[in-house]
Image (cartoon, rainbow, N blue to C red):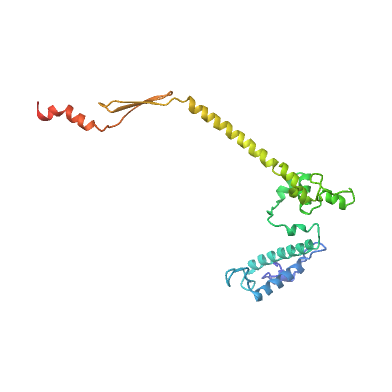
């Protein structure tokens, strides 16, 4: 789009061809994206759920500048590819079962995470999403074993969902929460050690002693580490001072 919509006539007339793969053509994708964006201007912004008119706004093709139009085309092409991928996944009964997941937390994998992962871990992660791990149910489907029944409950086929989160015997034995419980036990043991240490430290500490002298209003507080002296005014300080210096006032 930068070359095609350039202000320079020579650049526009160069007709540079962008090399792409055999299954995807950049020019065709851009034309389709522009057509969809122009059609969205006619349709307008649709309200979702209980939203009223004008609650949702988004950039329009007819009012966007050149840079904004390029960004809109890029977003539209990404959306088109996502839609085609979902359409293909719906036609696959087993590999597209992730579309029916409810309450599953989405996880975004970056290229740095993929490169740092071990091969077996990455393989398990991808194959678990598409249900292609060698579970007893899949092995039975592939003709490698004769009985797909779960060896623990001996009631249902041991599919991936059953093995990971639906076996009643594994749930009763605490196999699903074993790793989480081990972490909590370690934390609880550490906290128990700290509490016992604090209780012993409180018993060894000696309480401070306080003395009070009504004449000079001095309090002495000490413990096993240091001794400190503080002077505080008492309730009888003013009366004591008047009695002590009364002869000066009367002149006797």
Q: Residue at x 73, y 62 (%)?
A: 82
> Does any portion of residue 161 appear in the rendered image?
yes
Q: Against 179, is 40 above or below?
A: below
Foreground residue among 51 and 67: 51
Q: Residue at x 67, y 38 (%)?
A: 182
Image quadrant in which the N terminus is located: bottom right
- Residue lying at the far left of the rendered structure: 251
Image position, residue 190 (x, y; %): 60, 33
- Residue lying at the far top of the rendered structure: 224
Q: Residue at x 78, y 50 (%)?
A: 160
Q: Against 129, is 61 above or below?
A: below
Which image quadrant for residue 119? top right
Image position, residue 66 (x, y; %): 64, 68
Image position, residue 222 (x, y; %): 39, 25
Which image quadrant for residue 233? top left
Q: Residue at x 58, y 33 (%)?
A: 192
Which image quadrant for residue 209? top left
Image position, residue 242 (x, y; %): 17, 30
> Does any portion of residue 134 appear in the rendered image?
no
């Amino acid at each position: 789009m930068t070359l095609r919509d350039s202000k320079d006539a020579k650049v526009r007339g160069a007709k540079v061809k962008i090399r792409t793969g055999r299954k995807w053509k950049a020019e065709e994708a851009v034309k389709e994206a522009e057509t969809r964006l122009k059609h969205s201007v006619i349709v307008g912004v649709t309200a979702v759920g209980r939203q009223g008119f004008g609650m949702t706004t988004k950039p329009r093709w007819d009012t966007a500048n050149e840079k904004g139009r390029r960004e809109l085309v890029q977003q539209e092409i990404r959306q088109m590819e996502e839609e085609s991928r979902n359409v293909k996944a719906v036609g696959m009964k087993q590999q597209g079962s992730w579309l029916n997941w409810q309450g599953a937390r989405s996880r975004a994998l970056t290229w740095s995470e993929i490169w740092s992962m071990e091969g077996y871990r990455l393989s398990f992660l991808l194959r678990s999403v598409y249900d292609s791990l060698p579970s007893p149910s899949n092995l039975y489907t592939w003709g490698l074993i004769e009985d797909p029944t779960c060896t623990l409950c001996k009631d249902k086929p041991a599919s991936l969902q059953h093995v990971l989160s639906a076996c009643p015997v594994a749930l009763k034995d605490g196999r699903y929460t074993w790793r989480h419980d081990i972490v909590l036990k370690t934390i609880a043991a550490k906290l128990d050690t700290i509490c016992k240490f604090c209780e012993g430290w409180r018993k060894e500490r000696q309480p401070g002693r306080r003395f009070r002298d009504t004449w000079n209003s001095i309090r002495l507080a000490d413990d096993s580490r240091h001794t400190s002296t503080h002077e505080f005014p008492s309730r009888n300080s003013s009366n004591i001072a008047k009695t002590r210096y009364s002869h000066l006032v009367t002149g006797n």
